[in-house]
Image (spheres, rainbow, N blue to C red):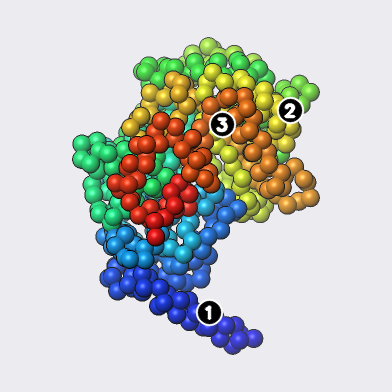
């Protein structure tokens, strides 16, 4: 039996190699002289064909594990110059939802670390920045900067994402109201354009490339190095959750708290998020683990008659040298101004790193129950502040019913912390909300949890917004036609198109986003 399997494997490999030999572009690739590894190993191909969403699958011809930025440049140059052309997609950690880092029949560049690792993070203590490889995971960025007592300022909720992957989108979490998204905290980048040029860009050098790549969905270049701004790292975090049954009191308080962004550190929170609570099951609230049974109030007792509850989540960072009493006073002073349900204050205190890495703990819990490797029909929307009450009525209290199938995050951000010159599009108001429906599809016999049902619900939500003229913008957008992309970008489309022509004229890069058709 084992012998037969080996023979089958050998035949499959031969077929792949013959296939590659017939494809001149990839044959050339083997001759280009890269320092990393070009792989047609079925394991590499399989993992590059799938992502966290588990709903889209595209098989590349080969996977490149680069050892240097030059490897990336050589591959892209070959794709650009060859008469046949082929697509090239950078893949960070493959945590996209709809195949954004996949490419059919092209080459996936697996940017995360492998055996032949590119440069390790380099911290400049004096100027408080770190230079990192584009495929570095944020958890590893954090570990390396902590050695110097420093840390990045702006985060995502989950740290097992790559720097290049989040900078291609925006990178947001509860610090964004204050520091802006991660793309507002980058000084400089090395980028390989769609012509295979390796350029260092910043606000001063090749500024157009710099701004295009930030939030650019991988369309204009591949980030091989990013210089990230740092701050002295806090050591501990006071993490507080308070509940609301009244949506307008909840959003009023969130908006008040983010309006304090220009105040001194002691007069504002460091992180502001929130979420919607429809019921208490694990799959609905996997990120809410600290509502433990030890808490004095049972959440369900607060939601009169199964009504929707809203949870405001805030933190105060502090240092070993801080006086704990003054932290208590600062927190109390801020909480006094809020209108939450009085008996609903949940507080915990933990090391800063444990707070930043909180979602990984939830991941391990879900993995142990077989609930992580499932399809994820997530929908992330930026909703203008003026229409968030309509969204609440129509979606949270309407379309969703009482089964959310995953956490629903909701928090506001200040638009002035986003650089208009980046490629991201946000609603046309000073304050807009992220609403993240982080749903897991399960095949356990419950119709409301199936992929089909949840995908249909996402369509209904988008349709509701359109019909109600709620001008949402998708975050981590997913569209299938260029018309939809044109609508998404609105006034920015002409710019996006012009920059694509300039930096990736053959439309080689990140074809999995489906913004532009390849030109070969
Ligand atoms: P991939 O999925 O591998 O790639 C995403 C896109 O970026 C692709 O188009 C790819 O071609 C391109 N790309 C990848 N690397 C590079 C590079 N070096 N240069 C240029 N382009 C590149 N997002 C937030 O903002 N905040 C959150 O709190 C947050 N939490 C998340 C939690 C989980 C559990 C998951 C699964 C996702 C979360 N995300 C969050 C979304 C996440 O930021 C995006 O999915 C991001 O694209 C994932 O990064 P990745 O490294 O896996 O990128």
Q: Say whether marks 1 and 2 touch (CB < 8 Å).
A: no
In front: 279, or 47? Answer: 47
Please tell me which of labels 1 and 3 falls first in the chain. Answer: 1
Look at mark 3 in the image and give the residue it sits on.
435
Looking at the image, residue 166 lies above or below residue 290 = below
- Give me the C-alpha separation between circle 1 and circle 2: 56 Å
Q: Nearer the viewer, residue 310 or 387?
A: 387
- What SS does tag 3 mark? strand
Q: Secondary structure at mark 2?
A: helix
- The residue tagged 2 is 300
Residue at the image point whose x is 54% and y is 18% from the top: 386
Pointer 2 local density, CA inside 10 Å: few below 14, some 14–19, many at least 20: some
The residues tagged by marks 1 and 3 sit, at their Cα atoms, a distance apart of 46 Å
Instruction: Say whether disc 3 or disc 2 marks the residue closer to the N-terminus.
Output: 2
Binning the other alpha carbons within 10 Å of mark 1 as few (below 14), some (14 to 19) or many (20 upward) gives few
Asked if the residues shown at circle 1 and circle 3 are in contact, with their CB atoms under 8 angstroms apart, the answer is no
Disc 1 element: helix
Which residue does the numbered mark 1 point to in the structure image?
A: 12
In the picture provided, is 89 more to the left or to the right than 395?
left
How many residues crowd around disc 3 within 10 Å: few (fewer than 14), some, or many (20 or more)?
A: many
**Residue 257: percent from left, percent from top:** 48, 18
Question: Which residue is located at x 54 percent, y 49 percent?
Answer: 98
Q: Residue furthest top?
A: 337
Rounded to the nearest angstrom, the CA distance separating label 3 from label 2 is: 23 Å
Mark 1 or mark 2: whose residue is earlier in sequence: 1
Q: Quadrant of the N terminus?
A: bottom right
Residue 482 image point, x, y percent: 48, 44
User: Image quarter for residue 417?
Assistant: top left
The relative height of residue 90 versus residue 78 in the rendered view (above or below) is above
What x and y, as percent, mark residue 104?
49, 61
């Amino acid at each position: 039996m084992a012998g037969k399997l080996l023979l089958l494997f050998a035949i499959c490999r031969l077929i792949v190699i013959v296939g590659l030999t017939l494809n001149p572009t990839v044959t050339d690739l083997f001759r280009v002289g890269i320092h990393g590894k070009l792989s047609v190993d079925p394991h590499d191909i399989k993992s590059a064909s799938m992502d966290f969403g588990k709903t889209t699958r595209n098989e590349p011809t080969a996977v490149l594990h680069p050892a240097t930025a030059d490897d990336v440049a050589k591959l892209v140059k070959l794709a650009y110059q060859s008469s046949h052309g082929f697509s090239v997609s950078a893949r960070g950690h493959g945590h996209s939802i709809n195949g954004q880092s996949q490419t059919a029949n092209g080459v996936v560049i697996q940017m995360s670390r492998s055996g032949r690792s590119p440069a390790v993070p380099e911290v400049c203590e004096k100027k408080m920045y770190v230079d990192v490889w584009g495929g570095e995971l944020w958890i590893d960025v954090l570990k390396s900067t902590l050695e110097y007592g420093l840390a990045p300022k702006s985060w995502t909720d989950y740290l097992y994402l790559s720097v290049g992957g989040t900078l291609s989108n925006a990178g947001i979490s509860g610090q964004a109201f204050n520091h802006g998204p991660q793309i507002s905290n980058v000084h400089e980048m090395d980028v390989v354009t769609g012509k295979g040029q390796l350029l260092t860009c910043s606000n001063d050098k090749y500024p157009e490339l710099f701004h295009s790549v930030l939030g650019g969905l991988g369309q204009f270049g591949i980030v091989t190095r990013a210089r990230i701004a740092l701050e002295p790292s806090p050591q501990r975090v006071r993490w507080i959750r308070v509940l609301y049954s009244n949506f307008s009191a909840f959003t009023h308080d969130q908006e008040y708290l983010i309006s304090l962004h220009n105040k001194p550190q002691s007069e504002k929170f460091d992180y502001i998020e929130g979420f919607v609570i429809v019921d208490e099951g694990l799959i609905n609230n996997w990120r809410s683990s600290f509502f433990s049974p030890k808490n004095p109030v049972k959440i369900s007792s607060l939601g009169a008659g199964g009504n929707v509850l809203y949870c405001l989540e805030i933190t105060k960072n502090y240092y070993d040298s801080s006086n704990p009493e003054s932290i208590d006073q600062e927190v109390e002073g801020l909480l006094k101004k809020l209108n939450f349900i009085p008996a609903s204050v949940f507080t915990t205190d933990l090391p800063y790193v444990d707070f930043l890495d909180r979602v990984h703990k939830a991941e391990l819990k879900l993995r142990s129950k077989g609930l992580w490797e499932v399809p994820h029909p997530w929908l992330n929307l930026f909703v203008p502040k003026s229409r968030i009450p309509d969204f609440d009525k129509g979606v949270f209290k309407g379309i969703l019913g009482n089964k959310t199938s995953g956490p629903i995050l909701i928090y506001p951000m200040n638009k002035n912390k986003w650089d208009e010159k980046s490629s991201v599009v946000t609603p046309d108001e000073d304050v807009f909300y992220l609403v993240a429906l982080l749903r897991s599809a399960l095949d356990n016999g419950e119709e409301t949890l199936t992929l089909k049902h949840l995908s249909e619900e996402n369509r209904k939500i988008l349709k509701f917004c359109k019909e109600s003229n709620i001008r949402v913008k998708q975050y981590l957008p997913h569209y299938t036609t260029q018309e939809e992309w044109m609508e998404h970008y609105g006034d920015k489309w002409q710019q996006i198109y012009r920059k694509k022509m300039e930096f990736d004229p053959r439309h080689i890069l990140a074809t999995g986003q489906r913004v532009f058709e390849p030109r070969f």
